[in-house]
Image (spheres, coloured by chain):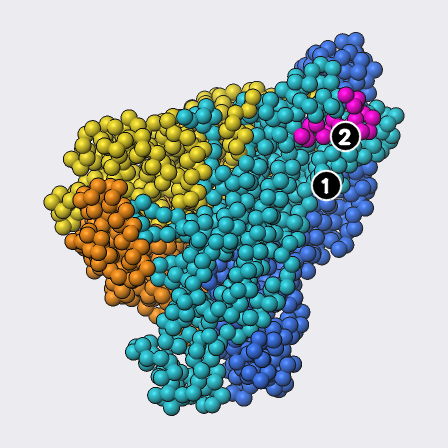
Chain colours: A blue, B orange, C yellow, D cyan
Amino acid sequence: MSSPDAADGADLGLLSPVRAGSAVAQATGDLAFLQAMLDAEAALTRAQARLGLAPAEAAQAVSRAASAGRLDPRGLAERARAGGNPVIPLVADLTAAVGPEHGPYVHRGATSQDILDTALMLVARRAVAVMAGDLDRTAAALARLAAEHRTTPMPGRTLTQHAVPTTFGLKAAGWRSLVLDGRDRLAALVLPAQLGGAAGTLAAFAEFAGPARTGPDGVPATRLVEAFAAETGLAAPVLPWHVLRTPVADLGAALAVATGALGKLAADVLVLSRTEIGEVAEGTGGGSSAMPHKSNPVRATLIASAARQVPALASILFGAMTAEDERPAGAWHAEWQPLREALRLAGGAAEAAAELAAGLVVRPERMRANLDLTHGLIVSERAGIRLADRLGRARSREVLDEASRRTAATGAPLAASLEALDAGGIDTDPAAYLGAAAALVDAALERESTS
Amino acid sequence: MSSPDAADGADLGLLSPVRAGSAVAQATGDLAFLQAMLDAEAALTRAQARLGLAPAEAAQAVSRAASAGRLDPRGLAERARAGGNPVIPLVADLTAAVGPEHGPYVHRGATSQDILDTALMLVARRAVAVMAGDLDRTAAALARLAAEHRTTPMPGRTLTQHAVPTTFGLKAAGWRSLVLDGRDRLAALVLPAQLGGAAGTLAAFAEFAGPARTGPDGVPATRLVEAFAAETGLAAPVLPWHVLRTPVADLGAALAVATGALGKLAADVLVLSRTEIGEVAEGTGGGSSAMPHKSNPVRATLIASAARQVPALASILFGAMTAEDERPAGAWHAEWQPLREALRLAGGAAEAAAELAAGLVVRPERMRANLDLTHGLIVSERAGIRLADRLGRARSREVLDEASRRTAATGAPLAASLEALDAGGIDTDPAAYLGAAAALVDAALERESTS
Amino acid sequence: MSSPDAADGADLGLLSPVRAGSAVAQATGDLAFLQAMLDAEAALTRAQARLGLAPAEAAQAVSRAASAGRLDPRGLAERARAGGNPVIPLVADLTAAVGPEHGPYVHRGATSQDILDTALMLVARRAVAVMAGDLDRTAAALARLAAEHRTTPMPGRTLTQHAVPTTFGLKAAGWRSLVLDGRDRLAALVLPAQLGGAAGTLAAFAEFAGPARTGPDGVPATRLVEAFAAETGLAAPVLPWHVLRTPVADLGAALAVATGALGKLAADVLVLSRTEIGEVAEGTGGGSSAMPHKSNPVRATLIASAARQVPALASILFGAMTAEDERPAGAWHAEWQPLREALRLAGGAAEAAAELAAGLVVRPERMRANLDLTHGLIVSERAGIRLADRLGRARSREVLDEASRRTAATGAPLAASLEALDAGGIDTDPAAYLGAAAALVDAALERESTS
Amino acid sequence: MSSPDAADGADLGLLSPVRAGSAVAQATGDLAFLQAMLDAEAALTRAQARLGLAPAEAAQAVSRAASAGRLDPRGLAERARAGGNPVIPLVADLTAAVGPEHGPYVHRGATSQDILDTALMLVARRAVAVMAGDLDRTAAALARLAAEHRTTPMPGRTLTQHAVPTTFGLKAAGWRSLVLDGRDRLAALVLPAQLGGAAGTLAAFAEFAGPARTGPDGVPATRLVEAFAAETGLAAPVLPWHVLRTPVADLGAALAVATGALGKLAADVLVLSRTEIGEVAEGTGGGSSAMPHKSNPVRATLIASAARQVPALASILFGAMTAEDERPAGAWHAEWQPLREALRLAGGAAEAAAELAAGLVVRPERMRANLDLTHGLIVSERAGIRLADRLGRARSREVLDEASRRTAATGAPLAASLEALDAGGIDTDPAAYLGAAAALVDAALERESTS
């Protein structure tokens, strides 16, 4: 049976399999946002109580009433349209729930943006933590692959063509390095509480407190910001950031970098999984009812789908920094859904990447077979260097070109083609031309995996 | 009470007030997509029955079973993750619902993409129709404003500064012109059904039909495409467009143009609503509990929020045209949610614009007062032209500069300042310098309002 | 020797090889824009002369002086900063060049935006024509490939895995279909001249003409727009479109669709060129000095680089539709460079695509070898359909799964594996399971190649 | 006279006045990139000489020859097309210039990407330094404004409407806070040299050095990376980052944040400069020849134009992280021009912002006049709080609504309207309701201005 919600236009993840059912999707649903807004309201009243600006009983009453399960998210969403944000109807419902005695201490001195922005940060904090865990798991699995395949030779490919050999360990170490970059960007985020009142001056808080408490410069009003931040567990901002949107832009950037990092992993898995290449496979690929032989790299596909979306979402968040006045007419409202979507896509991609990395099947024998596809041409760089020592640059180039032509035409090993041109004795084993791959893996693995 | 859906990460519109509760949001929810996928499945079986490739009873059985209300959208969303798309579990459930006799005629010969793409187009058709209606309503209201205020003078503003006078009618005619552009782009869209089978060759359809029916070149298989399109009411494509994504890119472009058109309307309403300008107001603005004097231009704000998001979503859809192979690993999956979101934002903006245009309060007296703010400097262009006739170009510029300085410094009317410099007799009434505004309004209104 | 221009920050194409030295790059350089602005100025004076609003001699003088070769583009660029656009210094220089007698007829009644927007359209027209020619050439070459390889079998690939066979002709027909879509989008563009005066009312034109000529409704002023458009060869707009930016947004959309179409071609060429796949090659690939065996798909790479940029540039143009007032402070200025860049990237990609399509090397023998890589599993869909007829759905699935497992494990042909399970006699030749591919090619080639 | 360069499609800044003639434009021109590539080549040979892998004379010869003034940037740009990047022809020209003896030490062991990526970082370092200086100058000027106008009252505006008073000092302190955020993001960037050889294994470097020098794990090859980084002054990377594009993505993010920060400043200046508002003006605005009274906020306009472009450019850079293989076919090539353009736009915006901030004219008397526009309604929040103390919440709301209606209708001061309703004695002076504005300014100014 379909739920009544679905009948009314709900989005349950049907069109976004990369995050459907993921932990981060749950942490970023409308109910999670609603609860975060209520948490912000309760934190505000508690902070005021802590400073003697509200009765302790009011704080308790608001905290008790602040349960999303008691409100109607769809109704709030629809009522949000009239004023342009969901906090307005939320405050009405919460005030009613708290009752006449303590109701006046609900949302006291605050503006809608204080609550919604604080909720955005609370939700982001939770989603980022979930995602960071998945990135750590991904990095750990990749570290194991890098160590295990430190010297497993495979073709290095540039512009789709075999270039020179590399190792799968170096590839995995590179993936891990990117994943750690993404995790570090997330770990570096500062997520602040928001409190400023109608236009960011904290005037109403001071007014409610009364002149005796606030003094000429409103010092206690800024203390209220600290108390509020402490209640939420978020950072205390120096200034209200209603229109100073660095925290949101930074989130967009970090999510885009983290998703891009996973996008690289996915792009490589997609290439290496190709039927003709077959060097890796997802542990359990997606099947096809009509084509039982297919084992699709589904996780990589879904990660790739996220990596195609998050950069554009981040661009919306960057653009929203251009926010006029003390509250902009549109730029702020344009942030909410793209930020949520970016959290979901990045988080869903991280969950998929953790599974992908943990289950990745690596096939050294296919790597070796592919290395031999060009009959030694994959080490022509090395042959060129050795020949130049012997014959000089110009002549060596001629010999190598001719040998390469022969090998490409006949399939004869490059060594044989060189031999036939009186240029034998060069080691053309791809596995013997790995450069500093192993040393690079070792160096890369020295980077700490957990932040 | 929160619904169970919400508890599991559902998106009900809380973070997107521009579309919360709108008709287009309802038409694009997960349940609507689910129903569209089922409609596509049923249309396929019916098309096969029409061509004698399936029993009529099977077509009836599938059509009967194809009701979204009987399925579980959340469960399907979560099961979609394994194979990367929701059609795979959907087919399983639908086949089970149809029963063993007719089950083999469910999804017969099709690939997931046939169903999902067809569903995308079915949903888009419905959403676009809703939106086109709102654009027509918006254009009609703007036509009335343009006619009524054909010669109502107001300041023309460039780079934020008063330039020369214009009329509110010309402004409204321009808005309408953009709205009609958006509507025309939507009306020009061709939304095709999708049918190609596993890799776009229609091979399985021919195979199921048997060689006797399909002949060497599979002609009846292409006839099946036509029959399927006819059952869905969508256009019949020449080629399967699994990886020829013009229909989706065109949708993105049309939605971006339409939303940009509304964004212009919103931007102007936001400027003209400013407390200091006050030339227009939304009929019923959004209020503020703490500041009873505020009447926020909420609809314009919400439209502006959509106009900031849709261009980036369209860029994702354009990027997805770069789709490798016969089905890409990620590019296709990256289209679904951005396309839905673009439909919702554009449609929600159109609904808001229809309300905004119908209720817009226009204040000619404020326009007139603002025209006089510069004491005649707003017609200095005209004065310059007239003076140049009289005094020559160089001298006229000197006189005008000096007169402008005097007027700016003292607030004396420009006419008086010119008089004082022996350059009197020039008509400085802003209402007398409207150029071809009225003629332009007339010309613009000749464009048909309904497509 | 480097030129002095380069020393001063010039961009000559060094960082954009996809368009360096292309015809479209030349048509969109600063000098081309400068000339287009001068052409617009000369057209305006001529249009006024045509209506008796300026002496014929003035029109001749302005037309003579309007040569970009006589002006200093770098100096104009730097002087543009003071007023925010290059027309202001341009008019000063042009007026000086025309001399005192006819100088007053330079830019008479116009605003900077009239000239710059008209120049944008003139440049776009030229660039689009160049590009359309390259798209036609590309389509013609692809038509030849489609016809020639109408039944050349190759693996159809979905989510990177072999699915069922297709033909190279069908693939080429699909590419061509996209290229024609792109060309049609370009051909449908309406590129209008711009003329509105300071705030879009044409007031100064009427004022210069005098009341006797313009009448109460300024009819002749709108006739001037028609005359101006005729002189430029551009379309005559109904309204000045200073802030009605559909023409620019439409350009962005068409360029994004056309580039996306080429991006699909490039993506497939990149896949099919891979060392392990080798089904196509660019006629003359890019070489590597150190690795003589490499033949990089350079044109496809450059096209792909353009397809990654144009969608984001189009998003800027869509966003610029949200343009406040009668001239926006920033949105207009944000269009110029992204529009130029989009023209260049799309045009450079089209030039590269024409070369790529004309020279593409197709290797049917590699396609055939790849078809056999899975030992018949690529036609398991067909086997499943045939077996189901014989054994029923459930049993046939069991048999096929078991046969597939055997073939995948042992490399035995699928036919043999089926035989061993008493399910022999099924045609597993990939070349015999092409569905309607040939018929689809024929249908697709009926679409006209030249618009 | 136009230069020959211009005739061939050069971009000299004509379409991008925000950066035309700026220091950052000069630092990012093709000649600057060319020189940076040559610097990278010279650094590589010197690094090899330092480790005994090349003769000191070769290092000197390459360093001497590595002068962009001796090469032809346009010719290189056009020759870049064949191989897809400009390093290939550059190496040929440089090798020829160095001569036969030392030529073999040019580009020894390197790949094109080593040189181009290192050049990108060298150019970015220079551009970022220029930009950081302008941001510091901007911040310093804003600090002075914030201190001077710490308590200068002005209307706080939300959703375009007057909300409650704020101070201009708080506004300026907020702008400065964003500018410092942008500068901090730039300062935190790590810009690494690039060195990896054909596929990132450093194999050719080891091969040239010979087995005796490199040992089993190629340790000296990694030492070469350090030596190379030291010669360039860039950071030494742990891994070659050919396909680990965090440095480029981070650049994109930092430039987008910095430009967004300036975009906020510009957006506010544009609002506050409006003819009707007039609270600030650019010191020397852009003029209009036809309308001498106009003083356009040109710098803010140009900054706004940059802020509309950089987010989309950053999205291209984020997307390019998804780079397949050891060198991607397109993703890498798609970075160069958007990165350059983002540097130019951000840098040009910073230069404009420094001028804007230094010359901004502030008009406290207009702020005061605007505060009084609503006759006291701007402090209705305060009145509501005070009345609620006195009359209870419900009754106070009624009284305030009624008083607000009277004041809005009649223009009578709010104090009088309240008095008439027996609710007098409330301080409705906007200047007396500034909350913690001054304290917030003080707190914000404690943040260090220079990084």
Cα separation, mark 2 vs mark 1, equals 14 Å
How far across and down, in percent of the image, does residue B316 sit? 51, 46
Magenta span main SS: helix
How far across and down, in percent of the image, does residue A418 sit? 77, 13
Q: Which residue is mark 1?
A: D235
The quarter holding residue C133 reads top left
Report if residue A375 is visible in the image. no
Same-chain check, marks 2 and 1: yes
User: In this rendering, is residue C179 above or below A421?
Assistant: below
Q: Which residue is mark 2?
A: D47
Q: Chain of mark 2?
A: D
Q: Nearer the viewer, residue A414 or B244?
A: A414
Magenta region: which residues? D39-57
Is residue C364 toward the left or the right of residue C292 in the image? left
The kind of residue on which mark 2 rests is: Ala
Is residue D292 toward the left or the right of residue B61 in the image? left
At 60% from the left and 55% from the top, the residue drawn is D180
Q: Secondary structure at mark 2?
A: helix
At 65% from the left and 37% from the top, the residue drawn is D122
Is residue A339 toward the left or the right of residue C422 in the image? left
The quarter holding residue A406 reads top right
How far across and down, in percent of the image, does residue C365 sit? 60, 21
